[in-house]
Image (spheres, rainbow, N blue to C red):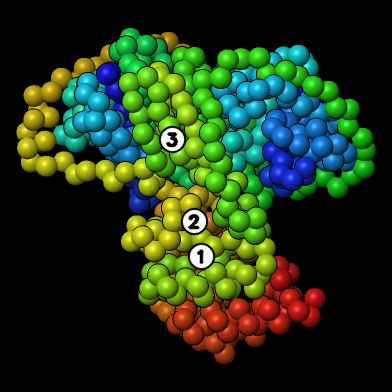
């Protein structure tokens, strides 16, 4: 059986969903998983991993917890010490950054932001997109270690029972970087890559102030993040962290609501693998309607508040 | 200070992609190319850093010799010289091979600071920067949106799922650049004229075997045919019904 070391991120003593999805992806592909965790509360989070697909967890200890280079070298040591065949992480900021470093330590290629992971005999095969989704590639590797990161919201979390054997590994490398401060964002604010529902606005919102309507619709869904088209990010209406598309983030939520977005090829590439797509646009010929499951033609400023109200009514019913 | 901006020639973001009939690759014959979006930001940051600290900027690219048009543009935008590690199969060079070949060239150029884009907009790996830094044994900060740098250390801000982190790094370092870090300049006529006299060298890249094996590459599956549920706010009940009962996402 293939054994993978899986980087598990956590907050408030619990594993983050993206990491649980990565464990789920490996488990579904028939791999044995060893979780590796770093940072404050790591030991507590490790204890919660029973049934997630991991049978063992390794908690990194030491003063260099916030240095990506030192942490990555410790993670590569864990792969060796555990006799594992590879390394896996969710394609979050830290997951992606650490996986690339660990892959280099293991002198192995990395497959980033994979949307498929399957076993083929003794080896693993991945599916991933090129050109932000304009092409879908199927790849295997001849590397000494198999390394990949998984796209958020694509893989199922394991809902099992079980226990996890927790051990420790000390970070020993001299750090070359140091995190001096973290300016946390509000707990309620989901990242556009992580959220199960994304409500995105484009130029059809007409003014930056009208994005309060998009924020309100996202709040009505409850589990939604606000997204934006490149046009409104470039005009400074919204931050780049919200941009969906080829020069922003590639997302795959269960539900994607595009409001006042015409659907440039770069935007479509970044959201076309979403579960269900809703488009609201005044132009019935807009390209966004070609990828949408459901469309409403009309003025976003009129439709969005009414839609928020309707969603709230449904949610209130339960 | 010797500063390097690594730049990659990629298909333009508005390019329509065509596939080989046997799914063995992309049809690249008539593809239009550009410098990857984030690499433009890397080049600008390299030039801004030179303007602040002094030194020389080298634009370094693994790519085809015919990519010199895009690399000349880097010279017009402020790089002092350019080195192309020529490889006609550059687009198929996997992230490890690319990182190793860039690391070898960076070592020879005796650089202290290397800027790269956060991700190249063709293969979307977001891996070459941190991999290259690891091969070099250097510090690395990925996805930088704000930074200050001195002769031997600097600080950079990155946006993560948790918020904004401020990271201190020692030099030598690899910095990968995210949107928002700066606004890349346009090449002025003066820059374009000056670029013609700047050195552009072609070298053979270091040997590095690929490990990624491509089985197939195809167009994404077409989405099922959708429908317009109606016009204006009157269509909302129909939409809610579809989301609840058909798509079951509400």
User: Can you say whether B171 is above or below A290 in the image?
Assistant: above
Give coordinates of residue A41: x percent, y percent. 76, 37
Quarter occupied by residue A12? top right
Report in which chain the residue with disc 3 lies. B
- Residue B156 bears which disc, if any? 3
Question: Crowdedness of circle 1 by 10 Å Cα count: few (<14), some, many (20+)?
Answer: many
Residue mark closest to the camera, 2 vs 1: 2
Front residue (pair B45, A76): B45
Which residue shows up at 86% across the image and 36% down it?
A: A47
At a point 60% along the width and 68% down the height, the residue shown is A218
Mark 3 Cα shell of 10 Å, populated few (<14), some (14-19), many (≥20): many
Q: CA distance from mark 3 to mark 2?
A: 20 Å
Instruction: Name the chain under label 2.
Output: A
Rounded to the nearest whole Å, what is the CA distance between mark 2 and mark 1?
A: 8 Å
Q: Is residue A173 above or below residue A2?
A: above
Residue A316: quadrant of the picture: bottom right
Residue at the farthest bottom position: B234
Could you tell me which secondary element the residue under label 2 belongs to?
Answer: helix
Q: Earlier in the sequence, mark 2 or mark 1?
A: 1
- Residue picked out by circle 2: A242
> Residue B75 appears in which quarter of the rendering?
top left
Q: Which residue is mark 1?
A: A200
């Amino acid at each position: 059986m293939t054994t993978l070391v899986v980087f598990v991120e956590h907050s408030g003593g619990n594993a983050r969903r993206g990491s649980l999805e990565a464990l789920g992806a490996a488990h579904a592909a028939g791999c044995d998983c060893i979780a590796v965790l770093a940072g404050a509360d790591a030991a507590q989070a490790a204890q919660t991993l029973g049934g997630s697909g991991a049978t063992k967890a390794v908690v990194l200890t030491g003063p260099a917890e916030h240095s990506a280079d030192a942490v990555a070298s410790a993670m590569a040591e864990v792969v060796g010490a555990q006799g594992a065949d590879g390394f896996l992480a969710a394609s979050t900021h830290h997951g992606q950054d650490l996986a690339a470093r660990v892959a280099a330590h293991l002198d192995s290629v990395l497959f980033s932001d994979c949307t498929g992971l399957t076993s083929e005999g003794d080896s693993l095969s991945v599916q991933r997109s090129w050109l932000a989704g304009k092409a879908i590639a199927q790849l295997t590797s001849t590397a000494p270690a198999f390394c990949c990161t998984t796209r958020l919201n694509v893989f199922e979390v394991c809902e099992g029972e079980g226990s996890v054997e927790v051990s420790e590994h000390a970070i020993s490398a001299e750090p070359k970087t140091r995190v001096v401060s973290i300016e946390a964002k509000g707990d309620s604010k989901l990242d556009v890559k992580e959220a199960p529902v994304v409500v995105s606005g484009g130029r059809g919102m007409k003014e930056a102030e009208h994005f309060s309507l998009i924020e309100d619709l996202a709040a009505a869904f409850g589990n939604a993040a606000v997204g934006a088209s490149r046009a409104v990010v470039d005009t400074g209406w919204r931050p780049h962290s919200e941009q969906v598309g080829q020069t922003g983030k590639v997302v795959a939520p269960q539900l994607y609501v595009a409001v006042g977005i015409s659907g440039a090829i770069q935007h479509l590439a970044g959201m076309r693998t979403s579960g269900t797509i809703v488009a609201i646009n005044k132009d019935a010929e807009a390209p966004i309607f070609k990828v949408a499951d459901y469309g409403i033609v009309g003025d976003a400023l009129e439709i969005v508040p009414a839609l928020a109200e309707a969603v709230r009514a449904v949610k209130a019913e339960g | 200070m010797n500063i390097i901006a690594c730049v990659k020639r990629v298909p333009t973001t508005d390019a329509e992609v065509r596939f080989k009939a046997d799914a063995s690759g992309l049809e690249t014959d008539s593809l239009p190319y550009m410098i990857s979006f984030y690499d433009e930001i890397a080049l600008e940051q390299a030039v801004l850093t030179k303007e602040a600290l002094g030194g020389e900027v080298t634009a370094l690219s693994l790519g085809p010799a015919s990519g010199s048009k895009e690399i000349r543009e880097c010279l017009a935008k402020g790089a002092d010289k350019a080195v192309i590690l020529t490889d006609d199969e550059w687009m198929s060079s996997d992230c490890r091979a690319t990182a190793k070949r860039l690391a070898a060239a960076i070592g020879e150029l005796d650089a202290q600071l290397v800027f790269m884009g956060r991700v190249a907009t063709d293969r979307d790996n977001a891996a070459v920067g941190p991999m290259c830094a690891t091969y070099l044994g250097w510090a690395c900060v990925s996805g930088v949106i704000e930074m200050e740098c001195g002769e031997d250390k600097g600080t950079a801000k990155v946006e993560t799922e948790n918020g904004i982190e401020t990271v201190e790094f020692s030099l030598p370092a690899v910095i990968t650049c995210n949107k928002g870090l700066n606004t890349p300049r346009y090449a002025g006529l003066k820059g374009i004229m000056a670029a013609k006299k700047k050195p552009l060298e072609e070298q053979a890249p270091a040997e590095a075997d690929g490990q990624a094996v491509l089985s197939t590459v195809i167009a994404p599956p077409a989405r099922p045919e959708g429908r317009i549920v109606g016009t204006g706010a009157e269509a909302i009940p129909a939409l809610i019904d579809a989301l609840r009962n058909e798509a079951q996402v509400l």
